[in-house]
Image (tube, rainbow, N blue to C red):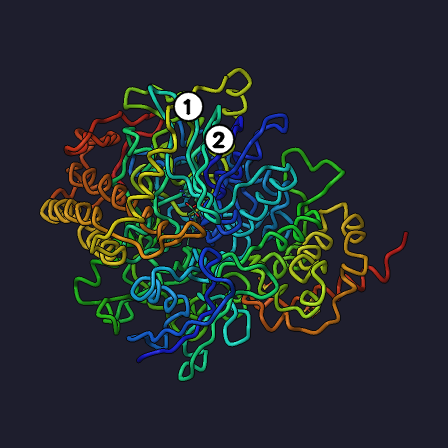
Amino acid sequence: MIKTYDVVIIGAGGAGLRAAVEIPKEYSCAVISKVFPPRSHTGTAQGGVCAALGNMEEDSWENHAFDTVKGSDYLGDQDAIEVMCQDAVRAIIELEHMGMPFSRNEDGKIAQRKFGGHTKPADPADPYGKRIPVMRACYSADRTGHVMLQTLYENCIKNQVSFFSEYFVTQLLVENGVCSGVVAMDISTGEIHTFHAKAVVFATGGYGRAFQITSNAHVGTGDGTNLVYRAGLPLEDMEFFQFHPTGLWRLGILVSEAARGEGGILKNKDGERFMQKYAPTVMDLAPRDMVSRAIITEIREGKGIRGSDGTDYVLLDVSHLGKKVIDEKLPEITGFARTYLGVEPTKEPIPIQPTAHYAMGGIPTDIDGRVFANEKGDIIKGFYAAGECACVSVHGGNRLGTNSLLDIIIFGRRSGKAVAEFIKTADYSPLPENTEEQTRKEIEALKTSTGKESILNIRTELQVMMMNKCGVFRNEKELKEGIEELKQLKERYKNISIQDKGNIFNTDLMEAIELGNLLDSAEATLYSAENRQESRGAHTREDYTNRDDENWMKHTFITKANGSEPKITYKPVVITRYKPMERKY
Amino acid sequence: MELSVKILRYNPEKDSKPYFQEYKVPGVAEDWRLLDVLHEIKWKLDGTLTFRRSCAHGVCGSDGIRVNGKNRLACSILLKDLNYKKTIIIEPLPAMPIIKDLVVDMTSFFQKYEVIKPYLITKTPPPPDAERFQSNEDAEKLFESAKCILCGCCTTSCPSTWTNDNYIGPAALLKTYRFVFDTRDEAPDERLDIIDNPDGIWRCHTIFNCIETCPKEINITWHISQLKTRLATREF
Ligand SMILES: Cc1cc2nc3c(=O)[nH]c(=O)nc-3n(C[C@H](O)[C@H](O)[C@H](O)COP(=O)(O)OP(=O)(O)OC[C@H]3O[C@@H](n4cnc5c(N)ncnc54)[C@H](O)[C@@H]3O)c2cc1C
Ligand code: SF4
Ligand code: SF4
Ligand code: FES
């Protein structure tokens, strides 16, 4: 069946909903999501969203931009970073006006706290000299993402946005540089629908589920990124995947950086505050890539603690903060430690290990969400992307904490605005022929397959391989092995079969399709990682330990070539005012 | 250890009515989440078993189910918190139509939530370049109610919901509190009018089922009682 809307937005996380709010009422707008909007992953974000409000101490958007550029290890595009940081203050105020409940300071203004990598000059007269942590992260206890998502959802209800909840998008309709819609399955009935649209916005989130230990929800399977990749369009900087240093041991559930922002300390098995060695000035509040490397290094030197599952962890101690601070400012995350590990954070340290967290790479876009068809900057007409699935690129090689919630509201809004402008004059582009056939065939094939492979085995092997061969530390030998393993997994994937053959709410089928998406996301990540012969941000090569600005100050664009190896091209990094420097903290 | 669970199964494409199916699940440990058990069954024993889930740590509200007669989130309850030596009985949340197995149709739950105008309503324009003022004390009065993850455990555990489909239910009342008591909101009366009727707040007889079941440990009835007091004392 064909449904027609001026705008179709895929994804009801922060980016998708913020875009939806921007579409004027006179246009029809549908938001499609595979889960109910308030179940989207944005709701799990804990620590905060940053803007140089200066509510607690002097700060400026330039400080924020400098930190973001440096945090990105100079791979972030500086024009986009300036746009984001300059607009951040307005964006946060706007969220407050929309109704978001923030924690407040003594003056009744939005409260702010410290977060990794967010700094200001110790001496304002020397902006590029020594820097000290600054309170820039706006928060609502440790449920910032939850209340942000709720607020945006509430505003969509107010604006009477049409939701297609529990619809699963399976195909992107793009032909000759023009996008005309998507194909989606109504999960509750199994019916296939074509959504014909003048403009399509992808806001489909990340793909942390490609890794064994991850903070990401089960639905974080990179569907959107993969649909773009499969349509023969490029993905940008896929080798940059962030490992958050503090996941709950064994489970990967996130313990927000807010814990360290409030004064929590990392310790090794000897009780040593090891971050002193790795980042003498900011210590535990160093950016994530550095802290994750430090933890793995400690573990490799035998200073971790061996857990009952055979993996090693280090300790995050917040007990000295006292019960009052913990209950008021970190109630949720300390609750997780209590519930899932039986640890009482007011009395004992929390066992943690790095957890796969955030995709810096994704669908390449300009600062208004328009999707690039290639590294030359040609645009796909009618196709936009925002949020974690997109790569603007503001995060470059490594995202700073609290910059993602900011990214989704800034670039979600900008995409929405650009779409609203575009549809004023745009017409519906014709749909390709037999739009739904590909999806129907794929589903039929999965349901009728009698192959011997199981979703579970392939997915587990993929996750273990990505963790071991494409994790915090990487090298050519292991990446090459990873690529070979992946090829075999993809072959075996052709022989998977599912047990549920029905139409209604077939989650067996969905998991099979999602696994296909994970395999392709992993492919783009592995090849991009193998190709980049330097260490930058979250991409750490043991065989190329230095950052190499001369050869690698450029974005990777990877495109799936039919049958053969993916093709890699490059796009230069945009540099405005910040010259690359060594990244020390 | 081996765990025994009985799960209420229903596939409208095949079954005329729901029935219990028993599974013996080997190799489980007492620090497993119940969600891990459901996954173990789905991934290793029976791919047709159907349930919702996403975050797996109690923040998205997807996996409300009924466990040994109590509404719980599968991801927030560990086996050691259950009497796991005996067979665990798992059913979908009550009082909502079953779509398949543990998946229920939450349409009416979300409709009730939408009815109370769950968004900030203001008439006075905010300061152009600054946030509205709110003391931290006033902000924190909202936090407990804002914690709600719309999982539906409370509303479907409420005897008043069981006897009357039209009862607005605790989750929507909690959301009403969230806005009525927001010092920034300027339409508390509009919302109070919506809940001030026999199918509204007055159907709550303070039976406390909702509190016992709320996975976020929200003191729902306290919030409802604040609304009742506000209604009783409001002046026109
Ligand atoms: C545990 C955790 C804590 C975090 N804390 C912070 C923090 O404190 N500060 C910060 O700045 N960032 C934080 N982040 C990162 C940040 O939360 C995310 O990057 C951001 O919320 C992503 O938002 P999004 O709108 O791009 O995508 P999401 O919120 O992930 O939404 C994706 C949407 O796409 C839909 N979708 C996906 N595939 C399909 C499909 N095939 N068909 C239909 N719909 C589909 C989903 O249903 C969903 O609605 C955190 C992340 C995690 C995992
Ligand atoms: S206290 Fe009210 S809302 Fe809660 S279960 Fe009882 S009747 Fe229902
Ligand atoms: S109040 Fe508690 S039980 Fe009810 S919907 Fe919210 S989180 Fe769930
Ligand atoms: S899966 Fe999110 S609350 Fe249980």
Q: Quadrant of residue B45?
A: bottom left
A15 or B205: which is nearer to us? B205
Quarter of the figure with the N terminus of chain B: bottom left
Q: Are marks 1 and 2 in contact (CB under 8 Å)?
A: yes
Q: CA distance from mark 1 to mark 2?
A: 10 Å
x and y, in percent, of residue A319 in the image: 43, 70
Q: Is residue B122 left or right of residue A88?
A: right
Going by the numbered disc 1, the residue's amino acid type is: Leu
Q: Check disc 1: other Cα within 10 Å, few if <14, some if 14-19, many if 20+.
A: some
Residue, disc 2: A2
The residue located at (70%, 55%) in the rendering is: B176
Q: Camera-side residue: A382 or A267?
A: A382
Q: Chain of mark 1?
A: A
> Measuring 38% from the left and 23% from the top, which residue is drawn there?
A432
Crowd band around label 2 with a 10 angstrom C-alpha radius: few (<14), some (14–19), many (20+): few
| SS at badge 2 | strand
Of mark 1 and mark 2, the one earlier in the sequence is 2
Tell me: A456 left or right of A111: left
Q: Residue furthest top?
A: A425
Residue placed furthest toward the right: B236
At 64% from the left edge and 45% from the top edge, which residue is drawn? A99
Q: Position of residue A204 (x, y in %)?
A: 41, 41
Q: Which residue is mark 1?
A: A431
| Above/below status of A569 relative to A57 | above
Res A64 visible: no
| A6 to the left or right of A467 | right
Q: Is residue B213 above or below residue A8?
A: below
x and y percentages locating residue B3 in the rendered image: 36, 78
- Same subunit, labels 1 and 2: the answer reads yes
Quadrant hosting residue A392: top left
Amino acid under disc 2: Ile
- Asked if residue B70 shows in the view, the reply is yes
